[in-house]
Image (cartoon, rainbow, N blue to C red):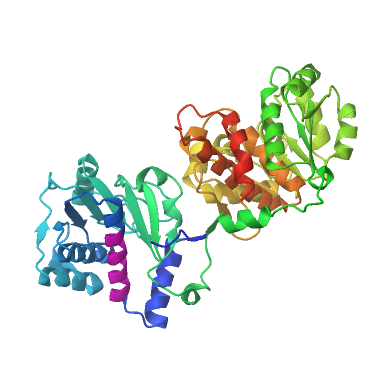
Amino acid sequence: MDRLPANVYSVAAVREMDRTTIEDHGVPGYTLMTRAGEAAFDAALVRFRSAAHWQIVCGAGNNGGDGYVLARLAGERGIAVSVVSLVDPARLAGDAARACDDYVAAGGEVEPWAGDLDAGAGLLVDAILGSGLEREVGGEFADAVEAINAHEASVLALDIPTGIHGDSGAVLGCAVRADLTITFVGLKTGLFLGEAPDYCGELCFAGLDIPAGFVASIAPALRRVDDAMLAQALPRRQRTGHKGDYGHVLIIGGGEGMPGAVRLAGEAALRTGSGLVSIATHPAHAAMLVASRPELMPHGVATPAQLEPLLERADVVAFGPGLGRSDWAEALFDCVATLSLPAVWDADALNLLADRPAAMRQRVITPHPGEAARLLGTTAAAVQADRPGALNGLAQAYGGTVVLKGAGSLVSTHQVPYLCLSGNPGMGSAGMGDVLTGIIASLIGQGVPVGDAAAVGVEVHARAGDRAATSGERGLVASDLLGELRRVVNP
């Protein structure tokens, strides 16, 4: 298998890659189909080596054709394999028909769908419908999807699980729940958005040996944050470096009774490499914060006037962790809203911003879907139904850089938005956003450009979460990430 590439494309863009390779560069379509079947066969051998009997469920079109190639290869290797078809093979055309004919010529048999699957199969292969699906799955196709999901066997999906929209990741009526999905030619946005992460299982990629030059002109829809980007943003430090070189972060928040959020954000900034971290918080909390983490510099701030000297010394501001909605919070908002300093806004700072919308070029906002809905005047469900659209709407309305948090966090840029594939469900717990705010602010303070700092910060946060979850996702808490950050930011 190939490593997951950085670029993620729309279905139309991947279709254009196919067309360009076949029509402009003379690579036969059946050659690509054969490569897809070979890649799927290799992946199945590695991932499902204990499965003695494979049953492949084929539909029409090239997705079914990939399934027939896989079936032929399995039979040639002595694996017990059977094929169930939802479409009369006589109706197949083009490369799919050729793949079916080659499978039959090699001694294979095609069984028509009769409403059930082989109870003895150890592996089921979903080769029913590909990434071009635009309407809800119905009829016998829906019956087959439900039968696959009810079966005890492991499931391999070819290109994308049947029923998942290739662009949005929405479930179209019903969808196959795969243990492994192997996708071909280019990564599709629908593998990562909407409900797709719950259906795709583990993901692997096969580029089918298409040279990069064949498809270089095709623009991606999203770009993954990868190791190369992290390495560029987090270079080895100079031996002569000192704390003044690594930024002074000012965290503003921690309203009365809520000191935990600024404590998490502050230590996250330190663990990410900040030279200095100050905290402007409610006067009741300053002594407690310095006692819990003496490297932090807490300041009790009762009025905006007391905030001014702290702002003069800061390189970047993190605003919102534990802020609350009190008169104290409102007064600090009025002070921070006109700053020219780079800033990261989260939590109640975003709720206050929703009441008084304003754009700011040097600001990063980090809403979860509920906060994004308030900022856009819509619902969380609408945000989740079109996350790229919501990201663009937030960037247009509020300027700067937007981090739309959630499974597959998105980060706006002036060009191609970034996509984070790291992270896990255990990170859905209190305080995780405060840690992220501290990480992004720290990177900005260390000189990483604001947009890149947001993208890299999201990835650093997610990778720390994955490290912290190695002993289990359930029960993961935000402070568990703090001990992992040093390992992630020293690649």
Q: Considering only vertical position in the picture, is 126 above or below 198?
A: below
In the image, residue 181 lies at what x, y percent? 34, 53
**Residue 299 included in the magenta stretch of the image:** no
Residue at image coords 70%, 53%: 236
Residue 379 in view of the camera:
no
The foreground one among 397 and 38 is 38
Residue at image coords 49%, 42%: 407
**Residue 32 included in the magenta stretch of the image:** yes
In the image, residue 332 lies at what x, y percent? 80, 29
Q: In which quarter of the image is residue 432?
A: top right
Give the farthest residue toward the front: 239
Is 434 positioned to the left or the right of 95 in the image? right
Q: Which quarter of the rendered picture does the N terminus lie within?
A: bottom left
**From which residue to which does the magenta span run?**
30-42
In the image, residue 93 lies at what x, y percent? 21, 72
Is 350 positioned to the left or the right of 164 in the image? right
In the image, residue 9 lies at what x, y percent? 48, 61
The foreground one among 439 and 242 is 242
Q: Considering only vertical position in the picture, is 403 above or below 474?
A: below
Residue at image coords 51%, 70%: 218
Residue 122 in view of the camera:
yes
From the image, give the main secondary structure of the stretch colored magenta: helix
Q: Considering only vertical position in the picture, is 82 above or below 179?
A: below
Q: How many labels does the image show?
A: 0
